[in-house]
Amino acid sequence: MADMNELSLRDVFAARRRIHGVALRTPLVESPALSRRLGAKLFVKLECAQRTGAFKVRGATNRIMSFSPEQRQAGVITFSTGNHGKAVAYVSGRLGIKAVVCVSEHVPSYRVERIRELGAEVLVKGDSQDEAEREYYRVVEERGLQPVVPFDDPYVIAGQGTIGLEMIEDEPELETVLVQLSGGGLGAGVALALKEIYPSIRLIGVSIERSPALLESIKAGRPVEVEERDTLADSLLGGIGAENAHTLRMVSRYFDEHIVVDESEIELGMSYMLREHSLVVEGAGAAAIGALLHRDWNDLGDKIGVIASGSAVDLPLYLETMSRLQGRDRDG
Ligand SMILES: *Cc1c(COP(=O)(O)O)cnc(C)c1O
Protein backbone atom coordinates (compact mmCIF):
# COMPACT_ATOMS: atom_id res chain seq x y z
CA MET A 1 0.00 0.00 0.00
CA ALA A 2 1.89 3.06 -1.24
CA ASP A 3 0.02 5.79 0.57
CA MET A 4 -2.04 4.65 3.52
CA ASN A 5 -4.39 7.58 3.08
CA GLU A 6 -5.27 6.97 -0.54
CA LEU A 7 -6.63 3.50 -1.05
CA SER A 8 -6.91 2.36 -4.64
CA LEU A 9 -8.48 -0.48 -6.56
CA ARG A 10 -5.12 -2.23 -6.47
CA ASP A 11 -5.51 -2.60 -2.73
CA VAL A 12 -8.84 -4.33 -3.25
CA PHE A 13 -7.31 -6.76 -5.77
CA ALA A 14 -4.40 -7.37 -3.39
CA ALA A 15 -6.95 -8.08 -0.67
CA ARG A 16 -8.71 -10.58 -2.87
CA ARG A 17 -5.47 -12.47 -3.32
CA ARG A 18 -4.75 -12.49 0.42
CA ILE A 19 -8.19 -13.64 1.49
CA HIS A 20 -8.50 -16.31 -1.18
CA GLY A 21 -9.03 -19.66 0.48
CA VAL A 22 -10.03 -18.16 3.84
CA ALA A 23 -13.11 -16.07 2.97
CA LEU A 24 -15.68 -17.59 0.64
CA ARG A 25 -16.77 -16.10 -2.66
CA THR A 26 -20.46 -15.84 -1.83
CA PRO A 27 -23.32 -16.04 -4.37
CA LEU A 28 -25.21 -13.04 -5.73
CA VAL A 29 -28.81 -14.22 -6.19
CA GLU A 30 -31.83 -12.58 -7.70
CA SER A 31 -34.81 -12.11 -5.45
CA PRO A 32 -37.84 -12.61 -7.73
CA ALA A 33 -40.56 -11.38 -5.36
CA LEU A 34 -38.82 -8.08 -4.69
CA SER A 35 -37.82 -7.77 -8.35
CA ARG A 36 -41.50 -7.98 -9.31
CA ARG A 37 -42.43 -5.41 -6.72
CA LEU A 38 -39.72 -2.97 -7.81
CA GLY A 39 -40.12 -3.53 -11.55
CA ALA A 40 -36.35 -4.05 -11.67
CA LYS A 41 -33.99 -6.92 -10.95
CA LEU A 42 -32.94 -7.03 -7.34
CA PHE A 43 -29.78 -8.97 -6.49
CA VAL A 44 -28.77 -9.99 -2.99
CA LYS A 45 -25.15 -10.73 -2.07
CA LEU A 46 -25.30 -13.58 0.41
CA GLU A 47 -22.68 -12.65 2.98
CA CYS A 48 -24.99 -14.30 5.50
CA ALA A 49 -23.50 -17.52 4.08
CA GLN A 50 -19.93 -16.24 4.59
CA ARG A 51 -17.61 -18.08 6.98
CA THR A 52 -18.38 -17.02 10.59
CA GLY A 53 -21.76 -15.77 9.35
CA ALA A 54 -20.76 -12.27 8.23
CA PHE A 55 -18.56 -10.44 5.72
CA LYS A 56 -16.16 -9.28 8.47
CA VAL A 57 -13.92 -12.27 7.83
CA ARG A 58 -12.78 -10.56 4.62
CA GLY A 59 -11.36 -7.44 6.28
CA ALA A 60 -9.97 -9.35 9.25
CA THR A 61 -8.16 -11.82 6.99
CA ASN A 62 -6.68 -9.08 4.82
CA ARG A 63 -5.45 -7.21 7.90
CA ILE A 64 -3.93 -10.22 9.65
CA MET A 65 -2.33 -11.64 6.47
CA SER A 66 -0.61 -8.27 5.97
CA PHE A 67 1.25 -8.47 9.27
CA SER A 68 4.83 -9.75 9.24
CA PRO A 69 5.39 -13.28 10.62
CA GLU A 70 6.87 -11.73 13.78
CA GLN A 71 3.87 -9.47 14.27
CA ARG A 72 1.51 -12.38 13.79
CA GLN A 73 3.44 -14.42 16.30
CA ALA A 74 2.87 -11.75 18.96
CA GLY A 75 -0.89 -12.28 18.57
CA VAL A 76 -3.73 -9.93 17.66
CA ILE A 77 -6.34 -7.95 19.57
CA THR A 78 -9.60 -6.23 18.71
CA PHE A 79 -12.78 -4.73 20.15
CA SER A 80 -16.09 -5.55 18.53
CA THR A 81 -19.88 -5.67 18.78
CA GLY A 82 -19.71 -9.27 17.65
CA ASN A 83 -19.15 -10.19 14.04
CA HIS A 84 -15.74 -8.58 13.73
CA GLY A 85 -14.61 -10.23 16.95
CA LYS A 86 -15.84 -13.56 15.64
CA ALA A 87 -14.00 -13.05 12.37
CA VAL A 88 -10.72 -12.16 14.10
CA ALA A 89 -11.08 -15.19 16.37
CA TYR A 90 -11.78 -17.47 13.40
CA VAL A 91 -8.91 -16.22 11.23
CA SER A 92 -6.45 -16.34 14.14
CA GLY A 93 -7.55 -19.87 14.93
CA ARG A 94 -6.94 -20.94 11.34
CA LEU A 95 -3.50 -19.36 11.34
CA GLY A 96 -2.69 -20.73 14.80
CA ILE A 97 -2.09 -17.35 16.44
CA LYS A 98 -3.37 -15.86 19.68
CA ALA A 99 -6.38 -13.51 19.66
CA VAL A 100 -7.86 -11.26 22.37
CA VAL A 101 -11.29 -9.66 21.89
CA CYS A 102 -12.55 -6.73 24.05
CA VAL A 103 -16.34 -6.26 24.18
CA SER A 104 -18.74 -4.06 26.17
CA GLU A 105 -21.35 -5.42 28.56
CA HIS A 106 -24.01 -4.65 25.95
CA VAL A 107 -22.79 -7.27 23.53
CA PRO A 108 -25.29 -10.17 23.69
CA SER A 109 -23.94 -13.18 25.59
CA TYR A 110 -24.61 -15.59 22.72
CA ARG A 111 -22.09 -13.58 20.69
CA VAL A 112 -19.49 -13.62 23.46
CA GLU A 113 -19.88 -17.40 23.69
CA ARG A 114 -19.34 -17.84 19.96
CA ILE A 115 -16.09 -15.85 20.11
CA ARG A 116 -14.85 -17.97 23.03
CA GLU A 117 -15.73 -21.16 21.15
CA LEU A 118 -13.54 -20.01 18.27
CA GLY A 119 -10.62 -19.97 20.69
CA ALA A 120 -10.16 -16.28 21.46
CA GLU A 121 -9.79 -14.75 24.91
CA VAL A 122 -12.75 -12.40 25.54
CA LEU A 123 -12.41 -9.39 27.88
CA VAL A 124 -15.84 -7.98 28.85
CA LYS A 125 -15.53 -4.42 30.13
CA GLY A 126 -17.52 -1.19 30.18
CA ASP A 127 -20.96 0.14 29.48
CA SER A 128 -20.43 1.16 25.86
CA GLN A 129 -18.45 0.37 22.76
CA ASP A 130 -16.25 3.37 23.52
CA GLU A 131 -15.37 2.03 26.96
CA ALA A 132 -14.55 -1.39 25.51
CA GLU A 133 -12.31 0.50 23.12
CA ARG A 134 -10.48 2.25 25.95
CA GLU A 135 -9.87 -1.10 27.63
CA TYR A 136 -8.53 -2.36 24.35
CA TYR A 137 -5.96 0.44 24.10
CA ARG A 138 -4.82 -0.35 27.63
CA VAL A 139 -4.34 -4.05 26.82
CA VAL A 140 -2.59 -3.28 23.50
CA GLU A 141 0.02 -1.33 25.46
CA GLU A 142 0.26 -3.86 28.24
CA ARG A 143 0.66 -7.02 26.15
CA GLY A 144 2.16 -5.81 22.87
CA LEU A 145 -0.50 -7.36 20.65
CA GLN A 146 -1.24 -6.32 17.04
CA PRO A 147 -4.46 -4.32 16.74
CA VAL A 148 -7.08 -5.42 14.21
CA VAL A 149 -9.67 -2.61 14.26
CA PRO A 150 -13.19 -3.27 12.99
CA PHE A 151 -13.57 -0.67 10.24
CA ASP A 152 -11.24 2.35 10.19
CA ASP A 153 -8.22 0.65 8.68
CA PRO A 154 -7.07 0.58 5.05
CA TYR A 155 -6.57 -3.20 4.99
CA VAL A 156 -9.94 -3.86 6.57
CA ILE A 157 -11.64 -1.48 4.12
CA ALA A 158 -9.87 -3.09 1.14
CA GLY A 159 -10.89 -6.54 2.40
CA GLN A 160 -14.57 -5.56 2.63
CA GLY A 161 -14.18 -4.02 -0.84
CA THR A 162 -13.78 -7.49 -2.34
CA ILE A 163 -17.58 -7.77 -1.95
CA GLY A 164 -17.98 -4.94 -4.45
CA LEU A 165 -15.62 -6.60 -6.92
CA GLU A 166 -17.52 -9.87 -6.78
CA MET A 167 -20.86 -8.11 -7.18
CA ILE A 168 -19.96 -6.37 -10.42
CA GLU A 169 -18.19 -9.40 -11.77
CA ASP A 170 -21.43 -11.32 -11.37
CA GLU A 171 -23.71 -8.44 -12.43
CA PRO A 172 -21.73 -5.81 -14.36
CA GLU A 173 -24.88 -3.85 -15.09
CA LEU A 174 -25.79 -2.98 -11.52
CA GLU A 175 -27.11 0.58 -11.55
CA THR A 176 -27.85 1.17 -7.89
CA VAL A 177 -26.36 -0.45 -4.80
CA LEU A 178 -27.64 0.08 -1.27
CA VAL A 179 -25.09 -0.43 1.51
CA GLN A 180 -25.81 -0.40 5.24
CA LEU A 181 -23.53 1.82 7.30
CA SER A 182 -22.20 1.53 10.81
CA GLY A 183 -18.49 2.24 11.20
CA GLY A 184 -18.31 2.50 7.43
CA GLY A 185 -15.71 -0.16 6.60
CA LEU A 186 -18.19 -2.06 4.48
CA GLY A 187 -19.49 1.10 2.83
CA ALA A 188 -16.05 2.57 2.15
CA GLY A 189 -14.67 -0.67 0.72
CA VAL A 190 -17.63 -1.54 -1.47
CA ALA A 191 -17.85 2.05 -2.67
CA LEU A 192 -14.15 2.11 -3.52
CA ALA A 193 -14.48 -1.02 -5.66
CA LEU A 194 -17.72 -0.01 -7.38
CA LYS A 195 -17.10 3.69 -8.00
CA GLU A 196 -13.51 3.30 -9.16
CA ILE A 197 -14.64 0.75 -11.73
CA TYR A 198 -18.03 2.24 -12.67
CA PRO A 199 -18.28 5.85 -11.44
CA SER A 200 -21.88 6.04 -12.64
CA ILE A 201 -23.13 3.43 -10.17
CA ARG A 202 -25.48 5.10 -7.70
CA LEU A 203 -24.72 4.38 -4.07
CA ILE A 204 -27.32 4.75 -1.34
CA GLY A 205 -26.16 4.58 2.27
CA VAL A 206 -28.55 2.89 4.69
CA SER A 207 -28.39 4.02 8.31
CA ILE A 208 -30.58 2.99 11.21
CA GLU A 209 -32.66 5.50 13.11
CA ARG A 210 -31.44 4.07 16.43
CA SER A 211 -27.71 4.58 15.80
CA PRO A 212 -26.99 6.91 12.87
CA ALA A 213 -23.48 7.90 13.98
CA LEU A 214 -21.88 7.86 10.54
CA LEU A 215 -24.69 9.77 8.89
CA GLU A 216 -24.68 12.44 11.61
CA SER A 217 -20.90 12.68 11.24
CA ILE A 218 -21.22 13.18 7.50
CA LYS A 219 -23.69 16.00 8.10
CA ALA A 220 -21.42 17.58 10.72
CA GLY A 221 -18.26 17.07 8.67
CA ARG A 222 -16.51 15.50 11.67
CA PRO A 223 -16.99 12.43 13.91
CA VAL A 224 -19.91 12.90 16.28
CA GLU A 225 -21.33 10.58 18.92
CA VAL A 226 -25.01 9.72 19.01
CA GLU A 227 -27.08 8.08 21.69
CA GLU A 228 -27.55 4.36 21.00
CA ARG A 229 -30.78 2.49 21.51
CA ASP A 230 -31.47 -1.24 21.32
CA THR A 231 -32.19 -2.36 17.79
CA LEU A 232 -32.78 -5.53 15.81
CA ALA A 233 -29.83 -4.35 13.70
CA ASP A 234 -27.39 -4.63 16.59
CA SER A 235 -24.40 -5.10 14.26
CA LEU A 236 -24.95 -1.50 13.16
CA LEU A 237 -24.55 -0.10 16.68
CA GLY A 238 -21.48 1.91 17.66
CA GLY A 239 -19.74 5.15 16.84
CA ILE A 240 -17.17 5.84 14.15
CA GLY A 241 -14.31 6.76 16.51
CA ALA A 242 -13.29 10.29 17.47
CA GLU A 243 -10.05 9.88 15.50
CA ASN A 244 -11.69 8.49 12.37
CA ALA A 245 -9.11 8.65 9.58
CA HIS A 246 -10.63 6.84 6.60
CA THR A 247 -14.24 5.73 6.54
CA LEU A 248 -15.89 9.12 7.19
CA ARG A 249 -13.93 10.72 4.37
CA MET A 250 -14.49 7.85 1.93
CA VAL A 251 -18.20 7.38 2.62
CA SER A 252 -18.77 11.16 2.41
CA ARG A 253 -17.06 11.22 -0.94
CA TYR A 254 -18.45 8.12 -2.62
CA PHE A 255 -22.08 7.88 -1.54
CA ASP A 256 -24.66 9.74 -3.59
CA GLU A 257 -27.42 9.78 -0.99
CA HIS A 258 -28.58 8.37 2.31
CA ILE A 259 -31.71 6.90 3.86
CA VAL A 260 -32.57 6.13 7.48
CA VAL A 261 -34.59 3.02 8.32
CA ASP A 262 -36.66 2.22 11.40
CA GLU A 263 -37.25 -1.01 13.29
CA SER A 264 -40.38 -1.98 11.38
CA GLU A 265 -38.48 -1.85 8.08
CA ILE A 266 -35.65 -3.93 9.55
CA GLU A 267 -37.98 -6.70 10.72
CA LEU A 268 -39.83 -6.58 7.43
CA GLY A 269 -36.56 -7.26 5.60
CA MET A 270 -35.66 -10.13 7.93
CA SER A 271 -39.08 -11.68 7.50
CA TYR A 272 -38.87 -11.33 3.71
CA MET A 273 -35.52 -13.16 3.55
CA LEU A 274 -36.87 -15.99 5.67
CA ARG A 275 -40.11 -16.33 3.70
CA GLU A 276 -38.75 -15.86 0.18
CA HIS A 277 -35.27 -17.37 0.48
CA SER A 278 -35.46 -19.55 3.61
CA LEU A 279 -32.47 -17.60 4.90
CA VAL A 280 -31.78 -16.28 8.37
CA VAL A 281 -30.52 -12.72 7.88
CA GLU A 282 -29.79 -10.51 10.87
CA GLY A 283 -31.27 -7.03 11.19
CA ALA A 284 -28.15 -5.25 9.95
CA GLY A 285 -28.20 -7.40 6.83
CA ALA A 286 -31.90 -6.88 6.13
CA ALA A 287 -32.28 -3.12 6.69
CA ALA A 288 -31.82 -2.21 3.02
CA ILE A 289 -34.18 -4.97 1.90
CA GLY A 290 -36.80 -3.69 4.34
CA ALA A 291 -36.51 -0.18 2.95
CA LEU A 292 -36.89 -1.50 -0.61
CA LEU A 293 -40.05 -3.37 0.44
CA HIS A 294 -41.62 -0.62 2.46
CA ARG A 295 -41.08 2.54 0.43
CA ASP A 296 -42.09 3.70 -3.00
CA TRP A 297 -39.15 3.64 -5.37
CA ASN A 298 -39.22 4.35 -9.06
CA ASP A 299 -35.78 5.56 -10.02
CA LEU A 300 -33.32 2.86 -9.01
CA GLY A 301 -32.56 1.64 -12.55
CA ASP A 302 -32.97 -1.85 -13.97
CA LYS A 303 -30.54 -3.70 -11.73
CA ILE A 304 -30.19 -3.11 -8.02
CA GLY A 305 -27.82 -4.70 -5.52
CA VAL A 306 -27.97 -5.15 -1.74
CA ILE A 307 -25.77 -7.01 0.72
CA ALA A 308 -27.29 -9.47 3.20
CA SER A 309 -24.28 -8.81 5.40
CA GLY A 310 -24.72 -11.35 8.17
CA SER A 311 -26.76 -14.05 9.87
CA ALA A 312 -26.00 -13.60 13.58
CA VAL A 313 -29.33 -13.41 15.41
CA ASP A 314 -30.45 -13.73 18.99
CA LEU A 315 -32.45 -16.88 18.28
CA PRO A 316 -35.35 -16.50 20.78
CA LEU A 317 -35.92 -12.87 19.73
CA TYR A 318 -35.62 -13.82 16.06
CA LEU A 319 -38.13 -16.67 16.32
CA GLU A 320 -40.57 -14.49 18.23
CA THR A 321 -40.30 -11.64 15.72
CA MET A 322 -40.59 -13.95 12.73
CA SER A 323 -43.60 -15.86 14.01
CA ARG A 324 -45.38 -12.57 14.73
CA LEU A 325 -44.67 -11.22 11.23
CA GLN A 326 -45.28 -14.43 9.30
CA GLY A 327 -48.51 -14.88 11.23
CA ARG A 328 -49.56 -11.36 10.28
CA ASP A 329 -48.80 -12.13 6.62
CA ARG A 330 -50.93 -15.27 6.76
CA ASP A 331 -53.82 -13.47 8.38
CA GLY A 332 -53.58 -10.47 6.09
C1 LIG B 1 -20.19 -4.84 10.86
C2 LIG B 1 -21.43 -5.12 10.17
C3 LIG B 1 -22.06 -4.16 9.35
C4 LIG B 1 -21.54 -2.73 9.20
O1 LIG B 1 -20.22 -2.66 8.76
P1 LIG B 1 -19.34 -1.37 9.04
O2 LIG B 1 -18.05 -1.62 8.36
O3 LIG B 1 -19.19 -1.23 10.52
O4 LIG B 1 -20.10 -0.21 8.49
C5 LIG B 1 -23.20 -4.54 8.66
N1 LIG B 1 -23.73 -5.77 8.79
C6 LIG B 1 -23.17 -6.71 9.57
C7 LIG B 1 -23.81 -8.05 9.66
C8 LIG B 1 -22.01 -6.42 10.29
O5 LIG B 1 -21.46 -7.36 11.07
Image (cartoon, rainbow, N blue to C red):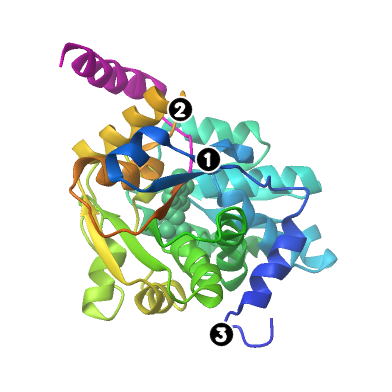
Q: Mark 2 or mark 1, which is nearer the start of the sequence? A: 1
Is 9 on the left-hand or right-hand side of 75?
A: left
Question: Which quadrant holds the C terminus?
Answer: top left
Q: Answer whether labels 2 and 3 touch (C-beta < 8 Å).
A: no
Amino acid at dot 2: His
Which span is picked out in magenta?
308-332
Q: Report if residue 104 is visible in the image.
A: no
Question: Which quadrant holds the N terminus?
Answer: bottom right
Q: Position of residue 250 (x, y in %)?
A: 43, 76
Q: Mark 3 or mark 2, which is nearer the start of the sequence? A: 3
Amino acid at dot 3: Glu
Q: Position of residue 68 (x, y in %)?
A: 80, 69
* Quarter of the view holding residue 205: bottom left
Residue at x-position 47% and y-position 44%: 44
Check disc 1 and report the residue beneath it: 29
Residue at x-position 74% and y-position 48%: 22
Q: Is residue 325 magenta?
A: yes
Above or below, comparing residue 199 to residue 207 in the picture: below
Q: Mark 3 or mark 1, which is nearer the start of the sequence? A: 3
Secondary structure mostly taken by the magenta-highlighted segment of the chain = helix
Residue at x-position 28% and y-position 68%: 257
Check disc 3 and report the residue beneath it: 6
Is 321 on the left-hand or right-hand side of 67?
A: left
